[in-house]
Structure formats: structure tokens, C-alpha cells
Image (tube, grey):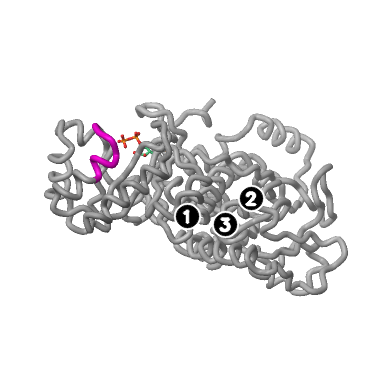
Amino acid sequence: MKELSSENDDKKFLIVSPQDIKSGVVTDKYFIWTEKILRSKGLNPRVVAEITAREWGIFSGLNDVLSLLEGKNVDVYAMPEGSIFYPNEPVMVIEGNYLEFARLETSLLGFICHSSGVSRAAFKAKFAAKDKKVLSFGTRRQHPALAAMIERAAYIGGVDGVSNYSAEKYLGLKSVGTMPHALIICFGDQVEAWRAFDEVVERGVPRIMLVDTYCDEKSEAIMAVERVERVDGVRLDTPSSRRGDIRAIIEEIRWELFLRGKDVNIVLSGGISFEDIAKLRDVVDAFGVGTSIACAKPVDFALDLVEKEGKAVAKRGKFGGRKVILRDGVIDVVVPYERAKDESESVLVKVIEGGEITKDGEIASSMEGGRSRALRTMELVRDFFVGDGRCAFKETLKGALIRTPDDTDLKSLL
Ligand code: PCP
């Protein structure tokens, strides 16, 4: 089969090629049969497809969807990246003849399910950390071909820094980090390793010394500040691998450093959960988070046909007809397209017109724009929970869907 041959066949890694994604080789077999059946019966209806999830999240991955759908004869509307979305709200709408995009559904959903899942996790981590820093340390937990995608999604979700070096090349983001245990073991002496780091690494990089390789975290933290010329912080990588009360250990370390007049930062990493962040943010300055962000549960987006030849349709369990989302801060009202007074107010913007990416599409898929949007949303969600949660939509149409941060699981991380 010609379409299944790949230019990656002679490469060392099992990674599907961008061309195979774009052309729809990366699809589920049932779409191949669907295409064959519809073509043989001369069916190719004009449809409106909506992409919705049953859960809330932070939307990202639009950049790759635009690359996927560019050149297809469709119009696409989408939420800008970094937007919060709630259950049953369309994050994207595709209008066109079904066969134009049918077999791309698998890759399209894959792009946004994974990326938005990572963005949501990063958002939760940063929401829990408040003014303390969150660093994405988890690309080693996933396939390396996904490293830049994961760091981009984490950055959009609100992390303060990403550790994968490829982010510099692929995203233009400066990568961050501390030091591995392997460096200390290579020296066989933690003080020598710390001093070497201080001597060799560029001056602009914070000196965060890893203090749990050979001895107790407190002894090594004291050793670091007393024996190394410049120390900006210490990293404890042990909360999940050691018994004991990590909060008590951190408080002891802070006291000892305070006693010595060394006001250095505490960085905590190793199996950190969102709940750990919320509980420890008062004694920790930065959290290095791996699995909880990089291996986040994907969002359960589905693509459904909601209109066929101009008529509202829906399968069981879905809301039929094209919709408009009206947003006030972080409170949404979803109304039928025909009932919306002013379409321009919709959260969904036209990102592709007749196969061409629009100016709005470029803006909506900007990484920095997405991150600013998510960070602004974080503050609005916080205000919603500490305020009266008032809905400014005074008159909503009967039957409209109203969604607020109460539809998320963020309250427990306040
Ligand atoms: C890595 C790093 C972070 C870990 C991964 C974050 O640890 O030090 O603490 O991932 P997690 O949240 O999934 O635990 P190691 O692989 O132990 O590497 P090293 O010893 O070099 O720090």
C-alpha cells in the first residue's frame, strides 16, 4: 500500500511523519471504510461539526490543528488557546462537506486532547502555587518526540519555566533547571560538584544545589550554604521516596538557613501533586513537577455532527445545532446560533476561512497570547470563588447552558 510507506522507514525511531498526519494516514480504520461507503453511495453532506468535552479544561493545541486543516475546503471557528472551557461547550466548530475532514478527526482530537490535558494540569499546578513558581520537569515521562508539544502546553497553562532544552529551539523559550544526582555522583563529593556548578555554569543561572544525594537534606543544605561561595537555592527531590514529614523537614531547613543569615530558595521536586503544592506553597519557593503535568489525563474531546444540510442534528447525549458561547469574565452562557443577538460576542473566532488561516487564527494560536489568557483566567477564577460568584448575564434565554468555575475542580486548590 503506497500511502502506508513512510519516509521514516529508514530512520531509527518509530515516529509517524508529519506528512502521514497531514494526509490522514494516521487515522482510525473506520474512517477509511466511511469514506469508501459515502463515496460509493454519492453522499457527502454539508455539515457543522462541533468539538466538545464532558469536562472542563484549558484549551491548547490549536496551532497543530491549524496546520492539519490548512488547505482543506472548510471554515473553522475556535476558542483562542489558553481559554478555559466547560463541559459541553464547543471549543471548535468545523463547517464544510464531511469528506473534506472525516479522516482527520483522529489526529485533530489527538492534538487537542493531549495538549489541553497538559495545559489544564499546568493551570491547576500554578493555580495551587499562587505566587510561588512551578517548573515543568516531566518531558522524560513521555515520548521524546512530544517534548516541545508538552512544554508548549505546560507554558500556556501557566508554568513559570520548562526544563526541556528543545524548548529553546522549537518554542524560543529559555529552558531552566538545577542539577541531576548523577553530577554529584560523578564527583563523588557534593561540595565539589556544587562548587564546579558555580564555577562553570553561566552567571545568569540560579545556583540551586541538590541537597539529598548522600546525607540528610538538612545537613546537605547547611553544607551547601556554608561551603559554596554562591547559593541561590536548594532542591529537595525526595518527598515521594523518603518516609517522614516533608513539611517538617523543609521548616527545619528554613530555620537553619535563617539562623545562618542565608535567605535561599527552597525548590521541591519528585512526585509532586497539585494537593502537595497547595499544602506546601507557604514553605516552598518553587515546585519541579514532572508526572502530574506531563502525564496529565487527556481531555475527552469528541467531534460530533450538530448540523446537516442546514438542519440541527444530534446523537443521544449531545446538544444539537450550532452554538454561540457568550462569556463574561469566567461565566459562560451557551445559546443556539440563531438565538444569539450578536455573533461577534462569541468566544469562538474564525480561525480558518476556505482553507486559509485567518489573522484571528494566528492570534488565537499564539503561545504567549495563550499563556497570558490562562494567567488572567486564573485570577478571574480566584475572584469568582472569593467573591460572590455573581452572573452578569441578567437575562439568559430559557434553556441556555450556564457554566461557571463551579463546573471545575479548582476550588479545593484555592
Ligand atoms: C527527575 C527530576 C524531578 C523529577 C524527575 C520530576 O528526577 O529530578 O525531580 O518528575 P516527577 O514529578 O514525575 O517525579 P530523577 O529522574 O530522579 O532525576 P535526578 O536524580 O537526576 O534528579
- Residue 99 appears in which quarter of the rendering? top right
Residue 129, label in figure: 1
Q: Is residue 358 visible?
A: no
Magenta span main SS: helix
Q: Would the CB of label 2 be found within 8 Å of ligand 1?
A: no
Q: Residue at the spot x=31%, y=45% of the render? A: 235
**Type of the residue with mark 1:** Ala
Q: Which residues are magenta?
A: 214-221
* Residue position for label 3: 414
Q: Is mark 1 within 8 Å of ligand 1?
A: no
Q: Few, some or many C-alpha atoms within 10 Å of disc 1 (few <14, some 14-19, many ≥20)?
A: many
Residue for point 73% across, 38% down: 39
- The secondary element bearing badge 2 is classed as loop
Check the picture and name the quadrant holding the C terminus.
Answer: bottom right
Q: Residues within 10 Å of mark 3 (few under 14, many from 20)?
A: some
Q: CA distance from mark 2 to mark 1?
A: 15 Å
Q: Which sits earlier in the primary sequence, circle 3 or circle 1?
A: 1
The residue that mark 2 highlights is: 409
The quarter of the displayed image where residue 379 is located: bottom right
Residue 393 place in picture, x, y as percent: 76, 72
- Can residue 148 be seen? yes
Q: Where is residue 188 shown, x and y percent of the image? A: 15, 31
Q: Secondary structure at mark 1?
A: helix
Taking the image as shown, residue 46 lies to the left or right of residue 385, namely: right
Position of residue 79 relative to residue 39, above or below, is below
Q: Amino acid at mark 2?
A: Asp
| 393 vs 263, nearest the viewer | 263
Whether residue 215 is in magenta: the answer is yes
Residue 378 is one of the magenta-drawn residues: no
Q: Please report the residue visible at 55 percent of the width from the left and 43 percent of the height from the top.
A: 114
Q: Pick the quarter of the image with the N terminus.
A: top right
Cα distance in 3D space between marks 2 and 3 = 10 Å
